Image: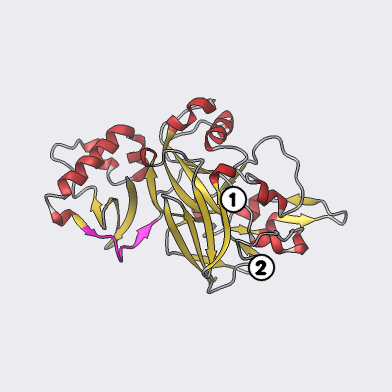
């Protein structure tokens, strides 16, 4: 199933995609739905916490909506919001070899660990702000986003995917000139706090695809288009650390709870890879277009992952 948050009048509602329609979950809630479940049908984090019981209610809502067209509205033209407001955004960078190869050399035995602020979350078709007081080197990073459904601590990789509610897409928008500084000897200093955290730094969407529809998260094609040019093209099969391994890793440090998300890193093809001022090393690939520079006002970025859809955002001047 594809779960969404969408704008209806002045309210943000929860829905599920059925064909070319959005089924409003509150409108289509079956008779006898408990007050606790009704509350969950208006808050994505609460719905995620309901687990399989919540998904069963959503399936019943779809069935109910097919008998009552008033509970449905066209998907075309709907104003989708970010499918959830995460309680925490855990991020792992340097998770594809071709991204490592396009930037200054790093030595790392464990996954990279940084956070993005949920205050930076925006949804599909919302605007990415290019604020020159923050950065002149604004970059894109298409990433598979793992949505935690079942909480836990010290989760072993062998059972980690049982804790996944679903998957989405995140554009890990990055201020490269805040993230990295080169030393005279060619080594680099990373500052992931300011490089990764600012307004509109985390577009997410267009929906959450529930885990039952993604049989193998390590076999998904991933692409990024900027103004129609293919900039990134890879597969989650090429991740250094799998989704299961990242869940194991992050749950070592914090108890994962429903609504926490894990962003799993981006492949090569970023604008950073073509920037010698920051140690970029232009990729030698013929199947993608090397970036001619960083994102500018007016650019359109489309992040695409197989089975998960397309996340589109336009860059505007702050």
Residue at screen point 51% across, 40% down: 218
Confirm whether the magenta stretch covers residue 77.
yes
Q: Position of residue 235 (x, y in %)?
A: 55, 48
- Give the residue pinned by disc 2: 136
> Is there CB contact under 8 Å for labels 2 and 1?
no
Judge whether 5 appears above or below 274 on screen.
above
Q: Secondary structure at mark 1?
A: loop
Dot 2, crowdedness within 10 Å: few (<14), some or many (≥20)?
some
| Image quarter in which the N terminus is found | top left
Q: Is residue 285 left or right of residue 145?
A: right
Q: Nearer the viewer, residue 67 or 182?
A: 67
Query: In which quarter of the view is residue 31 placed?
Result: top left
Residue at screen point 18% across, 37% down: 33
Judge whether 4 appears above or below 299 on screen.
above
Q: Is residue 152 left or right of residue 8?
A: right
Q: Is residue 67 left or right of residue 259?
A: left
Q: Position of residue 73 (x, y in %)?
A: 22, 59
Dot 1, crowdedness within 10 Å: few (<14), some or many (≥20)?
many
Confirm whether the magenta stretch covers residue 194.
no
Judge whether 8 appears above or below 114 on screen.
below
- Give the residue pinned by disc 1: 266
Asked whether residue 155 appears in the rendered view, the answer is no
Q: Position of residue 292 (x, y in %)?
A: 66, 70
| Image quarter in which the C terminus is found | bottom right
Asked whether residue 21 appears in the rendered view, the answer is yes
Q: Earlier in the sequence, mark 2 or mark 1?
A: 2
The disc at residue 181 is none
Q: Which residues are magenta?
A: 73-81
């Amino acid at each position: 199933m594809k779960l969404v948050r969408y704008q209806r009048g002045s309210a943000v509602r929860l829905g599920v995609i059925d064909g070319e329609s959005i089924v409003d979950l509150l409108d289509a809630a079956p008779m006898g739905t408990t007050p606790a479940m009704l509350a969950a049908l208006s808050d994505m984090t609460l719905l995620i916490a309901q687990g399989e019981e919540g998904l069963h209610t959503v399936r019943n809502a779809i069935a109910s909506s097919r008998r009552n067209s008033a509970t449905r509205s066209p998907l075309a033209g709907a104003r989708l919001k970010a499918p959830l407001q995460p309680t925490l955004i855990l991020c792992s960078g340097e998770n594809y070899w071709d991204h490592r190869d396009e930037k200054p050399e790093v030595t790392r035995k464990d996954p990279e660990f940084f956070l993005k602020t949920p205050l930076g979350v925006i949804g599909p078709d919302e605007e990415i702000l290019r604020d020159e007081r923050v950065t002149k080197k604004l970059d894109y990073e298409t990433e598979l986003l793992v949505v935690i459904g079942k909480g836990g601590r010290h989760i072993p990789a062998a059972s980690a995917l049982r804790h996944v509610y679903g998957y989405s897409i995140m554009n890990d928008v990055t201020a490269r000139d805040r993230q990295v500084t080169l030393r005279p000897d060619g080594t680099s200093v990373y500052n992931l706090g300011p490089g990764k955290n600012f307004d509109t730094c985390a577009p997410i969407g267009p929906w959450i695809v529930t885990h039952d529809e993604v049989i193998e998260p390590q076999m998904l094609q991933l692409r990024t288009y900027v103004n129609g040019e293919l900039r990134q093209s890879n597969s989650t099969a090429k991740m250094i650390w799998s989704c299961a391994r990242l869940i194991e890793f992050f749950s070592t440090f914090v108890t994962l709870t429903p609504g926490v998300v894990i962003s799993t890193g981006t492949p090569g093809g970023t604008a950073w890879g073509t920037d010698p001022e920051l140690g970029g090393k232009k990729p030698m690939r013929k199947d993608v277009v090397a970036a001619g520079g960083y994102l500018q006002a007016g650019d359109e970025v489309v992040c695409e992952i197989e089975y998960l859809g397309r996340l589109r955002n336009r860059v505007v001047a702050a």
